[in-house]
């Protein structure tokens, strides 16, 4: 099949120097073509449940459109790291990506609510919120910064893993250097629990743990396993402090150039892939826990109430703000 229409912007040259972003872009589109190709780039490897969810979305879109809409997927940071992909979407230089809501905080401050610990009661509550009006509102919010959200993917619950001792209560975190993502909310959370937050890039974390730069980190079960951090950290405390989803994003520039029918088909394929991916994530989580236990990791499920009590002042600090109103709205969902 000849691919004659693409909303990917080729000839895109991005250079970052002295804090400036220089862009040269040349769109290659053909009004006579009958196939639309969408380029989707992300930073995860091809074995990840999120990548497999995207493959499912691509397959369903091809089927629904009778082969007239195709998603080409570029994993493992082939077209840039997560933030770089987001920035490329904003200028229409890339069609699609996936982003953690944590990475979106600097673009959409309101999504920092997902980084506030213990906002959600459990996974059922989490998905009831995301599949409802609140979740839809967050997907729509990106429009003002050139990003069009089309669905959420499961990224599990983040919990602490450490080298020297198990985190059974918040007191165990006192004096410990814990790696966090570069997020103000994540740093505030670790501080509220008594630890010392230390932002380190994901790619450098294995070495940082090995060399004692940090005493531990926090992440979901599949990431703990696939990163092989369990080779160094033998204590995993499933306190499940945050549930931070991934969002599948489309460039608003590109979205507006799709026909209403193309938008409908893409949205349908994305939502179907979201439900498919959740099942994959659940299976992968169980598999990852079994692997790390077999490797000698001690897994502990602490009482969450002392952790919730410790971060209550953090919740209260949002009183009277938009984040505070969203937290209250989320917690009213039954």
Image: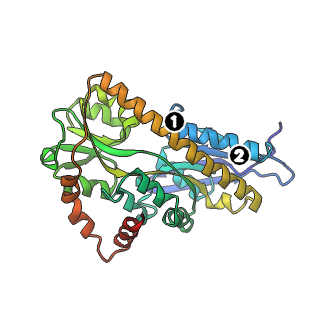
Residue 120's image quarter? Answer: bottom left
Q: Is residue 34 left or right of residue 57?
A: right
Residue tagged 2: 61
Residue 149's image quarter? Answer: bottom right
Label 2 crowd (10 A; few <14 / some 14-19 / many >=20): many
Q: Is residue 245 left or right of residue 253?
A: left
Which tag is nearer the camera, tag 1 or tag 2?
A: 2
Can residue 255 be seen here? The reply is yes
Q: Secondary structure at mark 1?
A: loop
Residue at image x 29%, y 31%?
207
Residue tagged 1: 76
Pointers 1 and 2 in contact (CB under 8 A)? no
The relative height of residue 275 versus residue 185 in the rendered view (above or below) is above
Q: Residue 147, image x and y in percent?
A: 56, 60
For the N terminus, the image quarter is: top right
Label 1 crowd (10 A; few <14 / some 14-19 / many >=20): some
């Amino acid at each position: 099949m000849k691919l004659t229409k693409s909303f990917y912007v080729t000839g895109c040259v991005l250079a970052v120097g002295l804090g400036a972003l220089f862009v040269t872009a040349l769109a290659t589109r053909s009004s006579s073509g009958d196939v639309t190709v969408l380029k989707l780039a992300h930073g995860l490897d091809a074995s990840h449940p999120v990548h497999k969810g995207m493959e499912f979305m691509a397959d369903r879109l091809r089927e629904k459109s009778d082969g007239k809409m195709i998603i080409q997927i570029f994993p493992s940071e082939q077209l840039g790291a997560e933030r770089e992909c987001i920035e490329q979407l904003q200028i229409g230089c890339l069609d699609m990506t996936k982003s953690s809501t944590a990475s979106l905080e600097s673009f959409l401050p309101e999504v920092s609510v997902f980084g506030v610990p213990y906002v959600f009661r459990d996974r059922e509550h989490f998905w009831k919120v995301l599949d409802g009006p609140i979740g839809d509102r967050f997907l729509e919010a990106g429009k003002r910064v050139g990003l069009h959200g089309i669905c959420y993917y499961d990224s599990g619950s983040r919990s602490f893993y450490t080298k020297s001792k198990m985190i059974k209560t918040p007191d165990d975190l006192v004096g410990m250097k814990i790696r966090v993502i570069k997020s103000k909310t994540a740093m505030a959370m670790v501080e509220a629990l008594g630890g010392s937050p230390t932002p380190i890039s994901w790619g450098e974390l294995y070495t940082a743990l090995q060399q004692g730069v940090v005493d531990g980190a926090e992440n979901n079960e599949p990431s703990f396993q696939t990163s092989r951090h369990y080779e160094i950290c033998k204590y995993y405390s499933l306190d499940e402090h945050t549930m931070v989803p991934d969002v599948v994003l489309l460039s608003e520039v590109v979205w507006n150039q799709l026909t209403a029918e193309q938008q409908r088909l893409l949205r349908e394929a994305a939502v179907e892939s979201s439900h498919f991916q959740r099942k994959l994530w659940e299976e992968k989580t169980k598999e990852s826990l079994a692997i790390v236990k077999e490797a000698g990791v001690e897994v502990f499920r602490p009482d969450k109430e002392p952790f919730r009590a410790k971060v209550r002042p953090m919740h209260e600090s949002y009183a009277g703000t938009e984040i505070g109103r969203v937290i209250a709205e989320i917690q009213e969902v039954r």
